[in-house]
Every structure is written in C-alpha cells, then in structure tokens.
Image: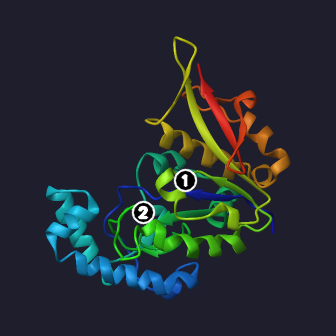
C-alpha cells in the first residue's frame, strides 16, 4: 500500500444538518481508545442543552443559532449521522471539494486526513457523526477546555498513527492546543503561513483567506500524495503549489518553528 501523508485539519464552525445514517455508534468511530471520553462529552453536552443560559455562555451563539445548536446537542444519541467530510462545511471544505477529487486523491484523503473535534477528539473523514455545536476552546468538563481534556489522549493516538510519516499540520491555534507534537515521532512536520506584501514592502499574515488557501493546499497534497508523504520531496511539491489568488511558495522565508518546518506562501 502506498504511503500517504498525515494531514491534520480543524472541523468547520458550520455543519450540515440531517443525514441519512443510523444514530451515533461509538464503536464504529475511528480511534476507539477515545470512546470513554467521547461518551462523557456527549452526555455532558446533551445535559447542558437543557439550560439555555449555560448553553449560550458555552457555545458563544444566540438567537436562532443558539436554538438550533441546543436542539442538535440535545439529540446527539438519536439524530441521523453522515460522514464527517459531509458534515463539516464552510470555506476550507468547499475549497477541498472532496466529491470532485480523483480516485487516488480521494483514497489519500480518506487514509491521511484526521479532523480535530471538540466533541469527538479526532475523527476520520468517513466516520459517521451527528450535527453538533462545541468549540475546542469551550469548557465543558471540569478538567478545563476541550483541548485540555483531549490533549493527552489525542497525542497518544497520533503517536502511533504518525510514526515515521510526514505530518502536514494545518491546525489553527485553538486546535493545536489539543495535541503535543513532541510526543509524536513523525518523519517530519510541516506547518504553513500565508503572507501578503504591502505597498511598504512589509509582510502581513493573511487571516481572511487562510481557510480558502489551506483547502486548496489540501487538494494539492492529496493529489500528489507520494511526494507529500516524503520529507525530501515536500519542498519541491510546495514550490509547485500556485493558488489562483496568487500565493506562491517562498523558500527564503521558510524556517524551522517549534520543531516543524514552516512553509511560507507569499503574494505581492
């Protein structure tokens, strides 16, 4: 079986509703060692959904969005499910455009992508999950934020999953807090940064387009999974990534940050 890169992604803030799958079955989820904590998280979130004031504080939404989130969280064990790659929506997942991937790229995506989740810890694209609302930075259990609860468990799970593989860490700060890269003996770890050169020649970090750019990069990685899975060819692969928005790889700005290679893409 061909090697594939390990790609770490955040979930989406928005999620599709409904689904055609049977209700949540923990035993069918990937990373079964996480199930005892998943059960506690689901139970606690379901109980909290009965308290509007507490839900508003925890979830950070109000009005119709709060009502929908509470309804989703109240029915986690009975609601229909669908694959995580269909459940998670938004700019990055639209840019990935999973249905349009070729067969080989889709296989690399399914084998290599792991999605962080405040509720489930980590899931694979094919895992069947219900609609829910819970941020990784929320404090659901007494042990602190979801990230703090999951960190030792996810780090252990990824330790065996990432061994001797190239890891493409595309996580924002909130989700990076849910694992410890120092506990993972991977072949190499790459992070990315997108910069815009201003009229004064100074660079500014791009935030408003980062999800779109990361989605396009994921497509590039899984469409060239053999190169993305080897540290020696990763820089050449990055150099071939040219986003329609005009961002291109700049090897001179690429540095080592926190024991990872930070690949920098620039638009003038």
Seen at 60% across and 58% down, the residue is 8
Circle 1 is placed at which residue position? 171
- Name the residue furthest top: 200
Who is closer to the viewer here, 21 or 217?
Answer: 217
Q: Is residue 129 above or below residue 238?
A: below
Q: Is disc 1 in contact with disc 2, using a CB cutoff of under 8 Å? A: no
Position above or below: 41 against 186? below
Q: Is residue 66 above or below residue 43?
A: above
Q: Residue placed at 35% from the left, 64% from the top? A: 138
Residue 136, label in figure? 2
Q: CA distance from mark 1 to mark 2?
A: 12 Å
Q: Place residue 71 in its image quadrant.
A: bottom left
**Mark 1 closeness class: few <14, some 14–19, many ≥20 residues within 10 Å:** many
Q: Position of residue 241 (x, y in %)?
A: 68, 36
Residue 22 showing in the rendered view: no
Q: Position of residue 249 (x, y in %)?
A: 69, 31
Helix, strand or loop at disc 1?
Answer: loop
Q: Nearer the viewer, residue 192 or 246?
A: 192
Q: Nearer the viewer, residue 194 or 111?
A: 194
Number of numbered tags placed on the structure image: 2
Residue 258 relative to residue 12: left or right: right
Q: Residue furthest front?
A: 143
Q: Quadrant of the C terminus?
A: top right
Q: Is residue 10 left or right of residue 76?
A: right
* Mark 2 neighbour density, 10 Å: few (under 14) some (14–19) many (20 or more): many
Q: Is residue 75 left or right of residue 175?
A: left
Identify the element where label 2 is drawn.
loop
Observer able to see residue 84? yes
Residue 68: x %, y % from top left: 21, 64
Which quarter of the figure has residue 155? bottom right
């Amino acid at each position: 079986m061909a090697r594939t890169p390990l790609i770490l992604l955040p979930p989406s803030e928005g999620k599709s509703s409904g689904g055609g799958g049977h209700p949540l079955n923990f035993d069918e989820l990937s990373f079964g060692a996480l199930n005892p904590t998943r059960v506690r998280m689901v139970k606690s979130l379901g109980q909290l959904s009965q308290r509007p004031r507490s839900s508003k504080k925890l979830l950070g939404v109000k009005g119709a969005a709060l009502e929908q989130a509470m309804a989703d969280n109240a029915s986690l064990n009975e609601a229909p499910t669908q694959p995580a790659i269909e459940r998670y929506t938004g700019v990055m997942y639209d840019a990935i455009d999973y249905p349009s991937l070729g067969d080989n790229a889709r296989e690399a995506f399914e084998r290599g992508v792991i999605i962080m989740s405040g509720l489930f810890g980590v899931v694979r694209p094919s895992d069947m999950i219900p609609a829910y609302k819970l941020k990784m930075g929320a404090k659901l259990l007494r042990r602190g934020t979801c990230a703090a609860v999951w960190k030792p468990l996810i780090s252990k799970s990824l330790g065996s999953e990432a061994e001797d593989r190239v890891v493409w860490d595309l996580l924002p700060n909130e989700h990076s807090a849910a694992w410890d890269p120092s506990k993972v003996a991977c072949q190499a770890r790459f992070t990315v940064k997108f910069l815009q050169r201003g009229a004064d020649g100074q660079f500014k970090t791009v935030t408003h387009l980062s999800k779109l750019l990361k989605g396009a990069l994921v497509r590039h990685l899984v469409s060239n999974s053999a190169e993305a899975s080897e540290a020696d060819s990763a820089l050449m692969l990055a150099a071939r990534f040219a986003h329609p928005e005009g961002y291109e790889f700049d090897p001179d700005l690429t540095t080592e940050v926190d024991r990872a290679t930070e690949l920098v893409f620039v638009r003038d």
